[in-house]
Image (cartoon, helix red, strand yellow):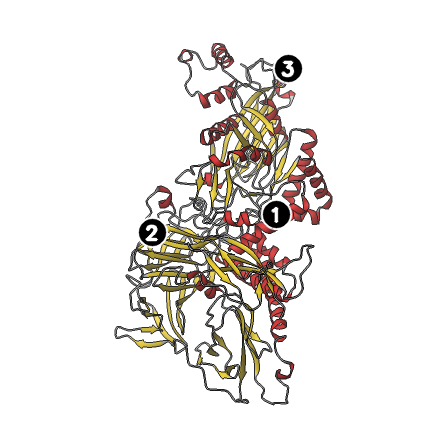
Amino acid sequence: MLIWPRGGVWLDIEQVIRWPSHWLQSSNQQERLVLSWWADEVRVWVDDVLVHSGDLFDTRCRWVLPERWRSSSGLRVRLQLRSPCHDDGALISSQLVREPLNPKEDPDGCLLPEALDLLQLSQPQIPESWLDSEPSSDQAVALVQSHLAEQAPANGVLHWVGHAHLDLAWLWPVADTWQAAERTFRSALALMERWPDLHFAHSTPALYAWMAQHRPALFARIQEASRKGRWEPINGPWVETDCVLISTASLWRQFDWGQKFSRQHFPEWRHDLAWLPDSFGFGAGLPAVANATGVQWFCTHKLAWNATNPFPHRLFRWRGRGSAEVMALMLPGIGTDADPVAMGAEQLKFQQSTGIDRALWLPGVGDHGGGPTAEMLEQLQLWQDHPQSPAREGGTVRGFLQHLEPLRTGLPVWRDELYLELHRGCATSRPDQKRHNRTLERLLREADLVAALLGQEGQDWAWLVLLFHQFHDILPGTAIPEVFDQAEPQWRAARRAAAAARDAGLKHLLSGNSPAGNRPGHGGERFAPERWAWCALQPLPRWSPLLRLPRGQWSSAGRRLPVQAAAAGGVWVQLPMVDGVSAVPLARALHRSEPCQSAEAVRDPVQVTALESGGWRLSNAQLSIDVGPLGLIGLRDAGGGDCLAAPLRLNRYRDHGEFWDAWDLAEDYRKHPLPMPERWQVQLQDSGPLVARVTLRGQFGVSALRMDVLLCADSPHVELLLSVQWRQSHELLRLECPLLSPAVRWASDTSGGVIERPAVPRTPMEKARWEVPVISWLASVPAAPGGGLALLLDGPQGVDAGSDHLGVSLLRGPTWPDPSADAGWHRQRVALMPLADGWMRNGVPQAAIRFREPGWHGPVDLQDFWQGLPAVPDGLIPLAMKPSMAADGTMRSAASALMIQLLNPGAQRLRWLLDDGWTMPTGETSIQLMPGELREVRLVRQSS
């Protein structure tokens, strides 16, 4: 192996290769130059002619040497290799090899080395009689030939399918992906014409959709090959999505749209397969989402990347928290070639793991596309009938899986998440991508709800932007800067489109519920009040809205509302409580022009008390906090019980030394703390009775931080609003909450559901989960009632938890592949919620929704209270609402029906008793969900 320094350094080497003197020339054989490398650009020149090029993904060549090289002059070979920016370059191997022209005849013993390697996979000991022979002697060759001839043919079958893994973006921008896909698809179709055994499988409906729009002739050829059974679409989600950072509603939409596209454009195949070879872990709720969209098979390779514990199964049943289950297959490596020894090793390992002698192999250049090459297919053919090689058969992925399906009942069952013991920094890197994602998720959910209530279509274009950018190297923040620069305007355009559709729909919906004669301006009043409204856009119970609005006198339905001047401008206003998808009419008067009843009393007001030690105690009837120059030093529940064993901490650590910089946290980061301010500049900004707010400011390194601590009237949590001008590199900023009541377990939401983990890890796999991704909340579970604590996140975020703490990773500073990935201004929100009765009984999942989705408000002509959808019961989680389509695919009449997706996150069955004129199509008014169940239900509004 030849190694040279990283940083884009070129290595230029040259050598004349001549026929080895001990080789016998034969007309029955040919020779190849076999190279492998680790370099981001490679050029192979022979006698000043470029014969091969490669990169970090196309890392091998098997170039056939021309006949003239046997002459005495030889060939002048020049290699030019450029090292990667992030790693040293390497010329891994350089060999001259011989192979027979006729695969069934090898009189010169060209294949003996690989044949012996294949035998030694199962018989590693060599005969003692060989020890006295010179390895390169004729005697040694004869001994090997004789020994191999005595062996029984190899057992097992290798079922091979051509494949090309193609990331939509990574170390290249998206535009390169379309070009790589086109090259790959044309190459695969051309090879099919020459190689009748070649079947080619490719995933990602988003790629096929681009081809259908921009390369229709090529897409038509793909469809024709698909109808012939040679081209196999192995489509699961719309893209090879991240599966731990997106909401359950997004994951559902990924699968739903991917499957619908596949069934429409490739109807000749059964589409029940989720192909996710490279995503960075999988939430425990994925089987439920997969089943809800008709998916029965799950395939990945990524768990082979586990850095600590090998995943124990290659074939198993993966069962979610409810009854949902998928068959799961751990794939062989992607981006492989046709090396006979590697193929034999895979067959043997799969058989040892599963007891099944038939294994899958996926030859083809991957990551940046490419697919199978003629060199690979020639090597496959060369070893097709060799007695030391397992039998090979070309076929489809579905053909291989069909062979496994009868074995279902005897397979092991996995009842847990599929946690990747690597890439633990992905939930924290590039927080701007997470912010765009969660904002667009919310806007689209709100726009879909409004469209459903109006009987209109949803925002398909904006949904496609969201789904595309949930790809597993974009949302996690592990791509080059150009990817994010090009994503930024798309994120913003999609957010504007979704917000505009929501706003226009809401104004139409709410204005239609106001009597024309009561609209502002009628009656000629000079100082008629401005009409506003606040709308809850989730069907939750007990909304207690508190808004910051423009200055003025605010009322609702003729009753004055509690108001408090806000230090940041405007006024805080507490609105009446409502349930479900509801709207509250608001009137703003700069001059009192119409009579109002007496003001509403403040619900659960905030009180502020100065502390003798400095700082303030902020309290309402549900909790109290102490905050001062030392930070947030105390948190108590409604009964006065302490939740924190010590002050809340903002900690900073060195986070350096990992190869996959943007992907991975340094496992030893806690051993390398960095200084943080011991005291903060503190100021009381708002002092109740609706809102109390204390601002803390400080500096560390070359960065500045401001933290606003807010307690609101009638709120079960205290909010921390962190604003950071982040200029640190290879550092980690974390929020740590020391727990007074030791936890025995801790719970959090995940894509597709909720998962509980032990607070004290005991098994090696539990200990490896020292940083995990969550979507919007985590909560400690003490042994006895009381003393629990939940953290509500405007996430997703990377977190950790133990018996004595909850922690959240806020910011990192990786420099590869994006040199300035996290630099800049960031705003993050976290809320602390004391729990007296546990996360489910205290309604943490619904509280997290209210925290992240506080509703909509704006000028609109609404004078009466309005309800569009009744509230779900406590505990039930509404995931998404969308328009209901008729059987013929057309939109149903306005507001007559909608689809709602629901999740029961708890351990008890839940029942929703519908009211206010809503029923199911069967006329039933009761919906029951079992523990962990996901369900999509059609609701119909009854005519009055």
Circle 2 Cα neighbour tier, 10 Å, few/some/many (<14 / 14–19 / ≥20): many
Regarding residue 812, the answer to whether it shows in the image is: no
Residue at x 50%, y 77% (from the top left corner): 549
Q: Residue 17 location in percent, x, y?
A: 57, 23
Say what amino acid the circle numbered 1 marks. Answer: Gln
Above or below 501: residue 606: below
Looking at the image, is mark 2 or mark 1 earlier in the sequence? 1
- What residue type is disc 3 on? Ser
Near-viewer residue (126 or 404)? 404
Q: Say what amino acid the circle numbered 2 marks.
A: Ala
Element carrying mark 1: helix
Q: Which residue is mark 3?
A: 27
Q: Earlier in the sequence, mark 1 or mark 3?
A: 3
Q: Which residue is mark 2?
A: 759
Q: Which badge, 2 or 3, is on the more N-terminal residue?
A: 3
Seen in the image, is 421 located left or right of residue 256?
Answer: left
Tag shown at residue 715:
none
Looking at the rendered image, the disc whose residue lies closer to the viewer, 2 or 3, is 2
**SS for callout 3:** loop
Circle 1 residue? 259
